[in-house]
Amino acid sequence: VQLQASGGGLVQAGGSLRLSCSASGRYGLGWFRQAPGKERGFVAAISWSGSTTYYSDSVKGRFTISRDNARNTVYLQMNSLKPEDTAVYYCAASSIIRNMIERNEVEYWGKGTLVTVSS
């Protein structure tokens, strides 16, 4: 499985960005992020069918994960961005989505894309 994330950039606080990640195969897909000096942490995930989504408390209500299996793409729409959202964002895939969410167990990682939110 090859994962390729894109869409990062610089945005002002309160703004929006949409990340995309091309991902083939029947996997649960998710996004993680790692801020400078911090461990990589779970952000959001979506089941292969797209029927179930999961979010960390810090992004719930502001971020939306979705996927288009016809295009082999998962998206992360990020609204109301805050400076504390600044991080490198990684796309991830796992055949057991609950392992990804509960134990950060990921089978495949993509290269990260940097999101910087200025105050």
Image (cartoon, grey):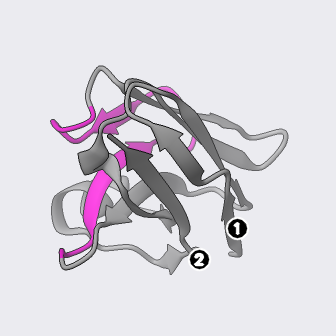
x, y percent for residue 117: 41, 46
The residue shown at (70%, 61%) is 25
The residue shown at (24%, 48%) is 84
* Quadrant of residue 88 within the rendered picture: bottom left
- SS at mark 2? loop
x, y percent for residue 8: 60, 54
The residue shown at (31%, 48%) is 85
x, y percent for residue 66: 57, 32
Which mark sits nearer the N-terminus, 2 or 1? 1
The disc labelled 2 sits on which kind of residue?
Lys
Q: Which mark is residue 23?
A: none
Is-magenta flag for residue 14? no
Q: Is the Cβ of the residue at disc 2 closer than 8 Å to that at disc 1?
A: yes
Magenta stretch in the rendered image: 38-59
Residue 30 relative to residue 66: left or right: left
Marks 2 and 1 sit apart, C-alpha to C-alpha, by 6 Å
Residue bearing mark 1: 4
Name the image quarter holding the N terminus: bottom right
Name the image quarter holding the C terminus: top left
Callout 1 crowding tier (Cα within 10 Å): few <14, some 14–19, many ≥20: some
**Residue 49 appears in the figure:** no
The disc labelled 1 sits on which kind of residue?
Gln
Callout 2 crowding tier (Cα within 10 Å): few <14, some 14–19, many ≥20: some
Residue bearing mark 2: 111
For the view shown, which residue lies furthest in the front direction? 119
Is-magenta flag for residue 41? yes
x, y percent for residue 58: 18, 38
For the view shown, which residue lies furthest in the right direction? 71
